[in-house]
Each structure stands twice: as structure tokens, then as C-alpha cells.
């Protein structure tokens, strides 16, 4: 028998434990001047990050009113709950199930001036392979994309499709931001944008 009534309680306990763990992490950051410049110019943009690095980067940007694209799957609900507690907005959908609705919500958020965060290999992979959704949203809204990577000195890795990274207590997390990528119009612009974003994500993961 599934105790659905217990899920909100488990979520709250999980959120509290994650926050207590995250409070011990140490961050070293490079390339943040790119984000700062976009914010000073009041220009919306899209953060892209690999799905496996959601947790350390979620905590890093807590309280900044970033809007996340989150899967409609029940697991996405847990992430949405943690995100809400940490000061994030959420659009439910994905590049697959409910994809059109989710991407439309993201475009509207960008056009309204928001910063958004998307995992271009989510919600179910393949891991570290860019899907077109994030690039299409940025292209439609006319905003740049900033790739961000996080490398962790000591972590647990789950047996999930993405090998979700959970940094251990008091570990150092090295975060790197890439220069903004402008997406050109048309199908060729989308294809080129996917290549540039993939390359940028692999570079920031190697640079961290």
C-alpha cells in the first residue's frame, strides 16, 4: 500500500536534511562576471547545466528568483518543492512529456524578464547530451544562454540514469560559468546553438 499522505512529510524532512548538508559546502567560482554583466544590463538569459549537477547549483543560486523547468513526473514534484523553499519559481514540463507547455511557459518567463534554468539532458537523458528545448526557448525569446558546470571534490553518486551528484559534507565545489552564447535564427541557428551549448557545457565541466 502506498502511503501518499506521507509524501509531503518525507519531502519536508528531505528538504531540511539537504539544506543542512548544503550549508557545509564551500564554493569556488570562476566566470561569474558573465552573469553579473547580464544582470547589470537587466537582460534575461537561460542557465544550462547537466542534470547530474542540479543539487549543488540549486543551492548556489538559492534566493535569486530563478525560474526552473521541472518535469511533471512525481520526482519533479520533490525538486519543485525544494526549489520553492529555496526561492525558485517553477514551470512544469520538459523537452518530452508536456514539453510544448513547459517551453511555452519558459519563453513567457524570459519575455517577462526572468532568468531561467534548464537541464538540456533532462528529464530522462541520455546523460550529458543536449536536447533542443533550451536552445529553442532562448532562440524564440531572443536571449543568450550561459552554461554552468560544477565539479565536486568528494561526492556520492546515485545509480540513476544521470548519476546524480550529492556533495559530501564540507566538500569543495568548483563552479565555472561560460561566456554567453547568442542563438541565431532559423533551423541552422538552432543546430549550431546545440553544438555550441554542448561544447560549452563540456568546457565548464573540464574547467572547474
Image: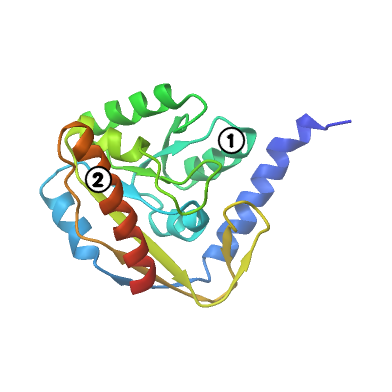
Where is mark 1, residue-wise? 77
Q: Which mark is residue 193?
A: 2
Q: Can you see residue 137?
A: yes
Q: Which mark is residue 201?
A: none
Q: CA distance from mark 1 to mark 2?
A: 30 Å
| Residue that lies at the very extreme toward the left in this rendered image | 41
Above or below: residue 18 compared with residue 205:
above
**Which quadrant of the structure image shows residue 131?**
top left
For label 2, the SS is helix
Question: Which image quarter is the C terminus in?
Answer: bottom left
Front-most of residues 184 and 163: 184
**Crowding near pointer 2: few (<14 within 10 Å), some, many (20+)?**
many
Q: Residue at image x 35%, y 50%? A: 48
Q: Of label 1 and label 2, which has the lower sequence position? A: 1
Front-most of residues 90 and 179: 179
Above or below: residue 101 compared with residue 43:
above
Where in the figure is residue 106, as x and y percent of width and height?
33, 31
Q: Residue at image x 44%, y 50%? A: 129
For label 1, the SS is helix
Where in the figure is residue 62, as x and y percent of width and height?
41, 52
Q: Can you see residue 112?
A: no
Above or below: residue 3 compared with residue 35:
above
Question: Which image quarter is the N terminus in?
Answer: top right
Where in the figure is residue 160, as x and y percent of width and height?
65, 53
Amino acid at each position: 500500500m502506498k502511503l501518499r499522505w506521507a509524501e509531503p512529510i518525507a519531502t519536508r524532512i528531505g528538504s531540511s536534511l539537504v539544506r543542512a548538508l548544503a550549508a557545509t559546502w564551500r564554493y569556488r567560482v570562476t566566470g561569474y562576471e558573465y552573469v553579473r554583466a547580464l544582470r547589470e544590463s537587466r537582460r534575461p538569459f537561460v542557465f544550462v547545466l547537466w542534470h547530474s549537477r542540479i543539487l549543488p547549483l540549486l543551492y548556489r543560486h538559492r534566493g535569486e528568483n530563478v525560474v526552473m523547468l521541472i518535469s511533471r513526473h512525481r520526482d519533479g514534484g520533490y525538486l519543485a518543492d525544494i526549489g520553492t523553499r529555496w526561492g525558485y519559481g517553477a514551470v512544469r514540463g520538459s523537452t518530452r512529456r508536456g514539453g510544448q507547455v513547459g517551453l511555452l511557459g519558459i519563453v513567457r518567463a524570459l519575455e517577462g524578464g526572468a532568468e531561467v534554468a534548464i537541464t538540456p539532458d533532462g528529464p530522462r537523458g541520455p546523460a550529458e547530451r543536449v536536447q533542443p528545448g533550451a536552445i529553442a526557448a532562448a532562440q524564440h525569446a531572443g536571449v543568450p544562454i550561459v552554461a554552468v558546470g560544477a565539479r565536486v571534490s568528494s561526492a556520492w553518486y546515485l545509480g540513476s540514469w544521470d548519476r546524480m551528484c550529492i556533495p559530501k559534507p564540507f566538500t569543495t565545489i568548483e563552479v565555472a560559468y561560460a561566456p554567453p552564447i547568442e542563438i541565431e535564427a532559423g533551423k541552422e541557428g538552432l543546430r549550431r546553438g546545440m553544438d555550441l551549448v554542448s561544447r560549452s557545457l563540456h568546457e565548464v565541466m573540464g574547467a572547474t
